[in-house]
Image: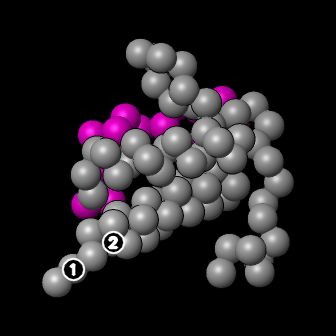
Amino acid sequence: MLDTTTHTHTTKTSIADSLRRGIVGGEFPSGSRLPNRRQLAERFGASSVTVQRAMERLVRDGFVYADGPNGTFVTPHPPPPLPLWAVV
């Protein structure tokens, strides 16, 4: 039987990591608006709840901020990239 808790955690982490790489790598420049939750759910093949959890992690880590109904935006000065050993 599939442990959905672990699967959701892994998917959330994968989505957050992918978006973080996009922010650090310039795909999503400072101040830009991220795609909405539905678009990201389609992009990653995940539920909108899982995407929301990934976004909450990025907010907590200081990479993005939520501006109510206007969307989620990359912070003007995102934190420096994590050392390689912390990502693996």
Specify whether 9 is left or right of 31: left
Magenta-colored stretch includes residue 40: yes
Give the amino acid at mark 2.
His
Find disc 2 in the rendering and name its residue.
7
Find disc 1 in the rendering and name its residue.
2
Name the secondary structure under disc 1: loop
Q: Is residue 54 placed above or below 31 in the rendered structure?
A: below
Residue at image location 21% in from the left, 80% down from the top: 2
Give percent across and percent down for residue 61.
69, 47
Give percent across and percent down for residue 85.
77, 81
Residue 2 in sight here:
yes
Specify whether 34 is left or right of 59: left
Instruction: From the viewer's side, name the closer residue of 34 and 68.
Output: 68
Q: CA distance from mark 2 to mark 1?
A: 8 Å
Contact (Cβ within 8 Å) of mark 2 with mark 1: yes
Q: Quadrant of the C terminus?
A: bottom right
Specify whether 41 is left or right of 88: left
Name the secondary structure under disc 2: helix
Which residues lie in the magenta part?
A: 26-45
Q: Quadrant of the N terminus?
A: bottom left
Residue at image location 56% in from the left, 63% down from the top: 17
Instruction: From the viewer's side, name the closer residue of 1 and 77.
Output: 1
Magenta part mainly helix, strand or loop?
loop
Residue at image location 54% in from the left, 19% down from the top: 67
